[in-house]
Image (cartoon, rainbow, N blue to C red):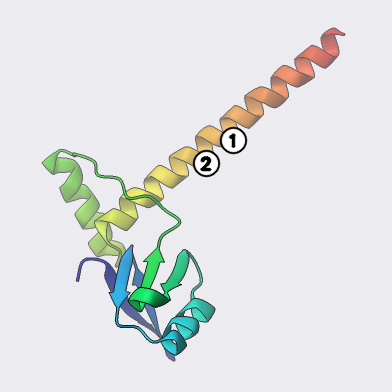
Amino acid sequence: MANLYVKRLKDRWVIHMKDTRLNGVSVELADFIKRLAKQGRVRYVPEYEALNIGLEEELLSVSLSVDIKDWLRKKGEQTGKSMQDIAAEILEEVYKQEQGRSKSNTNNFQSFNQNQS
């Protein structure tokens, strides 16, 4: 199943799910899952007995060269992560650096303007 990952952490199991709809779910099970969900949106639709689980993240498809995909795959194997997780971490780090740079530039501009007054 492409949208479900299960991993064992010492004394418990952790389930990671992407956007999913489960049909034939009881209200009790839906309430249990909603209480234990750590992230995302969990919504029960009683008339369909359906549980919708949605991410707070949007999926992104990117075309990459074979060399980059091989590099990501190797990094994933070395760290025990998926190549998607490695790519997401890299993008997140670059995004944070850019945001820090933007804030720094804004602060420098504000300081400059205050000194000019």
Q: Secondary structure at mark 2?
A: helix
Label 1–label 2 contact, CB within 8 A:
yes
Give how far across and how far down residue 34 sits, in percent: 49, 77
For the residue marked with disc 2, what is the amino acid?
Lys
User: Mark 1 Cα within 10 Å, few/some/many (few <14, many 20+)?
Assistant: few
Quarter-wise, where is residue 103 in the image? Answer: top right
Mark sitting on residue 100: 1
**Residue 10 shows in the view:** no
For the residue marked with disc 1, what is the amino acid?
Gly
Q: Residue at x 18, y 47 (%)?
A: 69
Q: Nearer the viewer, residue 21 or 114?
A: 21
Q: Residue at x 30, y 64 (%)?
A: 81
User: Mark 2 Cα within 10 Å, few/some/many (few <14, many 20+)?
Assistant: few
Give how far across and how far down residue 9 sits, in percent: 41, 83
Q: Quadrant of the N terminus?
A: bottom left
- In the rendered image, the residue lying farthest to the top is 116
Q: Which residue does the numbered mark 2 point to in the structure image?
A: 96
Q: Nearer the viewer, residue 2 or 86?
A: 2
> In the picture shown, does residue 84 fall above or below 8?
above
- In the rendered image, the residue lying farthest to the bottom is 11
- In the rendered image, the residue lying farthest to the front is 47
28 lies left or right of 66: right
Give how far across and how far down residue 75 sits, in percent: 27, 56
Q: Residue at x 34, y 69 (%)?
A: 17
Q: Quadrant of the C terminus?
A: top right
**Residue 17 shows in the view:** yes
